[in-house]
Image: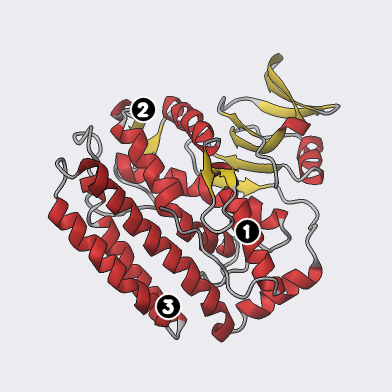
Amino acid sequence: MRKLLNTLYVMTENCYLTLDGENIVIQDGEKTLGRFPLHTLENIICFTYKGASPALMGACAERKIGMCFFSPGGAFQARVVGKEYGNVLLRKEQYRISDDDGRRIAYARNMIVGKVFNGRWSIERTLRDHAYRVDAKRLKQISDTLFEMLPRITDAAELDELRGIEGKAAEQYFSVLDEMILNQKEDFHFATRNRRPPLDNINAILSFTYTILAGDCANALASVGLDPYVGFMHGDRPGRTSLALDLMEELRPVLADRFVLTLINTKVIRGIHFEKQKDNAVLLNNDGRKVFFNAWQTHKKEVITHPYLKEKIEWGLVPYVQALLLARTIRGDIDEYPPFLWK
């Protein structure tokens, strides 16, 4: 099993990243802020204006170290991509499936089953732990509705039909997300999902978490030889990692949403960690991103038992394991893609 290594988050917006031997060096003008051995890193995520040297980007690509660049405000800019290490036959089969609606829907259905199943589980978890603090009747009603949607998903014969069911399921799920926010209601009230840009604190942190998770999924897919840009549920669009978005669907409720709810309900993230821009967009500020990534790294190291493999792994390895299972299904080693169904 792959070992989960460290992720380096570079938050100082004026720093520049360079390569010195086998080390990444973080510089702010003439001052060296840090030095880290490359062999200890799995990902580098930069929120800087100045970026990194070509030598460092080349070294990361050669060593298959994920490297993503964001603006200091948190907007995704670029991802370093090196040589493709996957089996060309695997990718050719992936492309054939993507071009055949009759084959791609089988993968898409299972991924959406995972998303709706896990969304329902998240609601049931809240009911189990906090029944006296929430509108239990409303949450139970939505949970039952999502359960009733699962057979419709598995029976969907066309992608448009599947997308319609998924959209209605997402609407039902988000209709009770505010009920699962137990503390800090004055700063975190969820009315509706909004993005591009997010207009409130809860949407800001959800969008930020999804962006980070999508990057992890893209890196995981590339590491097992799949093309993150060619999806099954999400269609082709220039610059969009469609397969990474597909893979992320089943992981959103348990790896992103539950994490965000925990940050809010335990008061790790607070209202002071956000700032409003001139266009009314709400973003995590620098202190907020530091708090977020400290908690994210801790969460990724928590050990769970994978529901399909029955092996103990860290949360941070879940995208990689699902990417590996997806690759094995495309190769024909597994009859049907097993989504991550968490309880």
Task: Name the amino acid, label 3.
Answer: Thr
Q: Is residue 246 left or right of residue 27?
A: left
- The answer to whether marks 3 and 2 mark residues whose Cβ atoms lie closer than 8 Å is no
Write the residue at 71% across / 14% down. 30
Of circles 2 and 1, the one toward us is 1
Disc 3 marks which residue?
154
Q: Position of residue 112 (x, y in %)?
A: 44, 67
Q: Position of residue 160 (x, y in %)?
A: 42, 80
Q: Position of residue 43 (x, y in %)?
A: 66, 39
Write the residue at 38% across / 62% down. 117
User: Considering only order in the chain, which callout, 3 or 1, is on the residue closer to the N terminus?
Assistant: 3
Task: Name the amino acid, label 2.
Answer: Val
- The answer to whether marks 2 and 1 mark residues whose Cβ atoms lie closer than 8 Å is no
Disc 2 crowd rating (10 Å Cα; few below 14, some 14-19, many 20+) is: some
Viewer-nearest residue: 116 or 200: 116
Write the residue at 60% across / 84% down. 100
Write the residue at 56% across / 28% down. 13
Q: CA distance from mark 1 to mark 3?
A: 21 Å
Q: Is residue 172 above or below residue 66?
A: below
Q: Is residue 109 left or right of residue 121?
A: right
Disc 1 crowd rating (10 Å Cα; few below 14, some 14-19, many 20+) is: many
Task: Name the amino acid, label 1.
Answer: Ala
Q: Residue reaching furthest front?
A: 310
User: Considering only order in the chain, which callout, 1 or 2, is on the residue closer to the N terminus?
Assistant: 2
Disc 1 marks which residue?
323
The part of the image, by quadrant, that contains residue 239 is: bottom right
Viewer-nearest residue: 234 or 4: 4
Marking on residue 102: none
Q: CA distance from mark 3 to mark 2?
A: 38 Å
Q: Is residue 30 above or below residue 249?
A: above
Q: CA distance from mark 2 to mark 1?
A: 31 Å
Marking on residue 268: 2
